[in-house]
Image: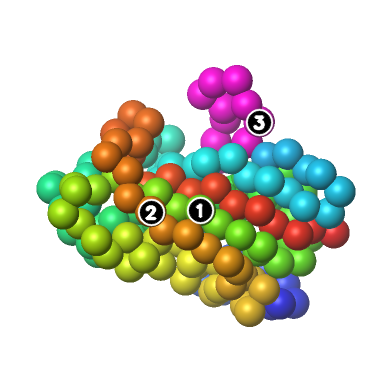
Amino acid sequence: MTSNPEKRVQELHLTLPPAPKPVAVYKPAVRAGNLLFVSGHGPLKPDKTLILGRVGENLTTEQGKEAARQTGLAILATLRDTLGSLDKVKRLVKSLGWVNCTAAFTDTPAVINGYSELMRDVFGDAGVGARSAVSAHTLPGGMAVEVEAIFEVE
């Protein structure tokens, strides 16, 4: 693991959005023992708006990848808000990413790599976990990407 994820955030000049608040009846993250289950997050920007669109229709693969990266930033914000510091993350265990895309679009792994590469950059090898990347015909509010994850924490 990167010894200091908080320092990596600074070194990478990352700007985290405000930690997302629930829009329905759920918690953004729930801890069970040493596991933190993070609810589905979307590509929340610092101005509290979401990246909207469908890959293969009005977003390119690269734009989808950027939306997945922004989703990762929102997850980092929730981790920090929940744990007090990203340094309390021991490793990423599992992620599930959905891509709002056309039926003909088949490169969902390339899109979700935007999220996965960010986790690796922040947490090092401990940021590379098991992962699924699937297509969705729509996502809440028309957002481009949604990711949920499980982290091992101190």
Residues in magenta?
16-28
Give the mark toward the camera: 2 or 3.
2
The answer to whether residue 20 is visible is: yes
Image position of 68 with respect to 27: above or below: below
Label located before the other in sequence (3 or 1): 3
Label located before the other in sequence (2 or 3): 3
**Colour scheme of the picture:** rainbow
Please tell me which residue lies in front, 106 or 55.
106
Asked where in the image residue 124 lies, by quadrant, the reply is bottom right
Point 47% across, 59% down: residue: 132
88 to the left or right of 41: right
129 to the left or right of 117: right
Point 77% across, 52% down: residue: 35
Asked where in the image residue 105 lies, by quadrant, the reply is bottom left
Q: Quadrant of the N terminus?
A: bottom right
Task: Give the residue type that dot 2 points to.
Answer: Val
Label 1 belongs to which residue?
Answer: 96
* Image x and y of residue 50, in percent: 36, 39
Task: Give the residue type that dot 3 points to.
Answer: Lys
* Image x and y of residue 91, in percent: 71, 67
Say whether marks 1 and 2 touch (CB < 8 Å).
Answer: yes
46 to the left or right of 119: left
Label 2 belongs to which residue?
Answer: 134
Question: Mark 3, residues whose alpha carbon is within 10 Å: few (<14), some, or many (≥20)?
Answer: few
* Image x and y of residue 6, in percent: 67, 65
| 22 part of magenta stretch | yes
Label 3 belongs to which residue?
Answer: 27
| Helix, strand or loop for disc 3 | loop
The answer to whether residue 15 is visible is: no
| 14 part of magenta stretch | no
